[in-house]
């Protein structure tokens, strides 16, 4: 009987999908005037995402969604990423509160994050941070453009009458 219970326990463990919910910050310290990316990753869950409050920060872009589904031999795995591009409005230490993933049976939360914003006397502004590298595109040597692209031609109206705004 012990072996039957153990076998049943192991089978149930493999049949259920483990949900995971994580957060990643592109940098934990930046200069004032620069932006950072906050990325949430949800695996094997269809629960509702509740974003944290971004008090003291300017939302540049987001929420931006990226998702994938993989089915191999009837086993389905899903992954969803939700990202935000933010810029702090002042110098200091910021705490980004946890985000929540709310389901009927379970609520998951991420860890709270700390961000330090330092003065920027030289006015150094970097481009938006990139979090994930795409191996296929990064390893490909893109050709240089040997020519300058032509400017699009403006279409001329065939009518001789002037246009009138309505």
Image (spheres, rainbow, N blue to C red):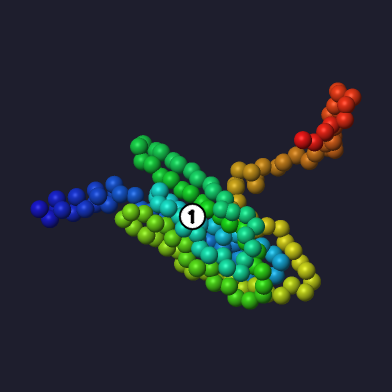
Query: Badge 1: how crowded within 10 Å, few (<14), some, or many (20+)?
Result: some
Q: Residue furthest front?
A: 166
Which residue is disc 1 drawn over?
A: 41
Spot occupied by residue 17 in the image (x, y as percentages of width and height): 34, 49
Residue at 45%, 42% (x, y): give it: 69
Mark 1 falls on what kind of element?
A: strand
Residue at 72%, 41% (x, y): give it: 142
| Count of labels in the image | 1
Is there any visible trace of residue 97 in the rendered image? Answer: yes
Task: In the rendered view, tell whether residue 122 sits above or below residue 160.
Answer: below
Is there any visible trace of residue 22 in the rendered image? Answer: no
Spot occupied by residue 7 in the image (x, y as percentages of width and height): 19, 50
148 left or right, relative to 43: right
The quarter holding residue 149 reads: top right
Spot occupied by residue 151 in the image (x, y as percentages of width and height): 84, 36
Task: In the rendered view, tell whether residue 128 sits above or below residue 65.
Answer: below
The quarter holding residue 71 reads: top left
């Amino acid at each position: 009987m012990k072996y039957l219970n153990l076998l049943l326990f192991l089978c149930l463990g493999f049949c259920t999908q483990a949900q995971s919910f994580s957060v990643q910050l592109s940098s934990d310290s930046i200069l004032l005037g620069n932006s950072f990316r906050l990325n949430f990753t949800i695996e094997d869950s269809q629960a509702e995402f509740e974003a944290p409050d971004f008090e003291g920060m300017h939302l540049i872009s987001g929420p931006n969604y990226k998702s994938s589904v993989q089915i191999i031999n009837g086993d389905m795995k899903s992954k969803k990423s939700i990202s935000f591009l933010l810029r702090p409005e002042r110098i200091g230490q910021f705490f980004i509160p946890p985000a929540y993933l709310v389901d009927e049976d379970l609520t998951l939360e991420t860890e709270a994050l700390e961000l330090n914003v330092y003065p920027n006397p030289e006015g150094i502004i970097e481009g938006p941070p990139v979090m994930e590298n795409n191996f296929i595109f990064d390893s490909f040597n893109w050709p240089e453009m040997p020519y300058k692209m032509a400017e699009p031609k403006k279409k001329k109206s065939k009518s001789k009458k002037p246009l009138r705004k309505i």
